[in-house]
Amino acid sequence: MKQLTVLLFLFMGIICSCGSDDSDMNEMSMIESEKIYQGNFVSVAHPTSGTASTNKERTMLAFKNFKTDKGPKLDVYLAKESDPKNYINLGELKGIEGDFTYDLPSNLNLTEYKFVVIWCVEFSVSFGHAELK
């Protein structure tokens, strides 16, 4: 009876160890690290449209089919919220229509800084934003 109990415990240990190992966790973190974040622009103070997305390496932010109104000074913010209080300024908007790219800071946490905001500096107003998901 003792031998049967020992064998049963050994068998259960083998089965349990096969279900989830470090390779599953490594695979999940690899998938997460290769995730492309993307969002569609929505209008706020001015009509704004197009998409914003990152590359797999998260070194670049790309605008595709982007369009907004002309403003006196428009900057691109990467912010923690759609009405930016905590943000990283990626620089001046490169154009009001077309496809553009911006360099992203290294070690950027896109789960925190998930809003791309087109910000009118002179009037402190958002023309529009995209939430990166």
Image: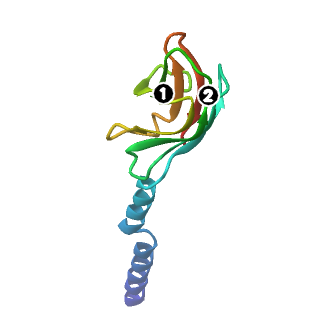
Circle 1 is placed at which residue position?
Answer: 93
User: Which sits in the foreground, 3 or 21?
Assistant: 21
Circle 2 is placed at which residue position?
Answer: 68
**Residue type, mark 2 in image:** Thr
Does residue 5 sit above or below 73 in this rendering?
below
- Identified at 38% across, 86% down, the residue is 2
- Identified at 43% across, 56% down, the residue is 34
User: Marks 2 and 1, how far apart in space?
Assistant: 10 Å
Does residue 31 sit above or below 21 in this rendering?
above
**Residue type, mark 1 in image:** Leu
Give whichever of discs 2 and 1 has the lower sequence position. 2
Q: Residues within 10 Å of mark 2 (few under 14, many from 20)?
A: some
- Identified at 40% across, 46% down, the residue is 58
Say if mark 2 contacts mark 1, CB within 8 Å.
yes
Q: Residues within 10 Å of mark 1 (few under 14, many from 20)?
A: some
Tally of numbered tags: 2
Q: Quadrant of residue 129?
A: top right
Q: Quadrant of residue 118?
A: top right
